[in-house]
Structure formats: structure tokens, C-alpha cells
Image (cartoon, helix red, strand yellow):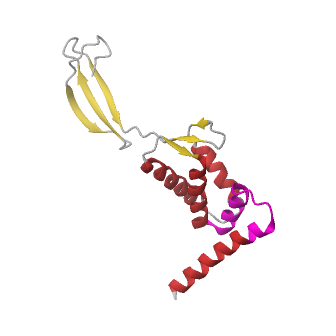
Amino acid sequence: MKCPFCNHEDTPVLDTRLSEDGHSIRRRRRCGNCDKRFTTYERIELTLPVIVKKNGSRTEFDPSKLRGSLMLALRKRPVSAEAVDMAIQSIQDKLLQSGEREVMSGQVGELVMRELKRLDKIAYIRFASVYKSFEDVTEFQDAIDEVGQERKGARKRES
């Protein structure tokens, strides 16, 4: 690490501690040339993949857009803010775990649908109707039947 005062490269570490937030390491250093002391922080840098839209354009992943979509689907539904936060974190974790530098927007949409299906079936149907561009009542009915069949399967397993 170069000294910020004289640019000398010999800056041994005097003390290492976990930072107060627990997400970084704080290191006290002293320059071997000018004898000045300074602090550095070591943090994990996680980069979420770039989202490739249907038209081919690329955009940075934006958790606030994700939150907006979820909140729109969950409007007036009995789902806590904590549950929404956990869903957003789950989607971000899956994107990070993919290891991909770019992800198609459709993959993000599928992750959102999976989380909504888990959180609230009505919100899932709302989101799916826009995401899948339902054009007639039969497509709504098919989605409702799909959710209903899963619910029946869950009841049978509980018995």
C-alpha cells in the first residue's frame, strides 16, 4: 500500500481490527519513509451482473426498481416490509451466486415471480399478468389454476 503523503511503498501494518459495522477490516499503517500514520479499510466488493433488456440494451442492476415492481404487485396485500426485503435479498443473492457478468431481464423476472409466488399468490397473479402480457381471460385462468394446484398439493402433503 502506497503512503498517501509521500507515495512510498513500504507501509507496514501496525494494527488490524474488524470495523464497527463488521463488514470491513480496519488497518493502521505507518509509512517507512515519512513516518506518518494512516488508516486503510479492506472490504468485499461484490458486483451484481448487468441486466440485458429484451431490446439488447444494458443497465446496472437497481434494487430500487426491483422493490418498486414488488411493491406494485403487493399493493394492499398483507405482506410485511421485512418479507419484501428478504425477497429482494434472495434475488440479489441468486444473481451473485450465478457468477454471470450479464443476466437477461427475463431471468430476473422469473426470480421475481418465484418470490411473489412464495410471498402472496394474488401478487404473483398481478405480476404475471403484466410480465407475461396476458391477453385474454384464459391466460389468467391458467395462472390461477397453476397456483391452485400447488396449494392443493401442499395441503395433501400436510395431511
* Viewer-nearest residue: 42 or 95: 95
Q: Position of residue 150 (x, y in %)?
A: 59, 76
Residue shown at the point (56%, 60%) measured from the top left: 83
Where 39 falls versus 102 (above or below)?
A: above
Is residue 121 highlighted in magenta? yes
Q: Is residue 56 left or right of residue 41?
A: right
- Residue drawn 62% across and 38% down? 56
Residue plotted at (57% across, 66% down):
118
Relative placement, left or right, of 21 versus 8 is right
Residue ID at (24%, 24%):
29
Query: Where is residue 105 drawn, in percent x and y?
Result: 60, 47
Front-most of residues 117 and 81? 117
Is residue 64 depicted above or below 113 in this figure? Answer: above
Position of 137 relative to 68 (above/below) = below
Residue 55, by quadrant, is top right
- Is 143 covered by the magenta stretch? no
Picture quadrant where residue 43 is located = top left
Whether 53 is drawn above or below 41: the answer is below
Principal secondary structure, stretch drawn in magenta: helix
Q: Quadrant of residue 136?
A: bottom right
Q: Nearer the viewer, residue 14 or 7?
A: 7
The extreme right residue here reads 136
Assign the N terminus to one quadrant of the image: top left
What are the residue bounds of the magenta stretch? 120-141
| Residue 84 point in image, percent of width and height | 58, 57
Q: How many numbered circles does the render carry?
A: 0
Q: Position of residue 15 (x, y in %)?
A: 22, 32
Using residue 43 as the reference point, say whether residue 11 is left or right of it: left
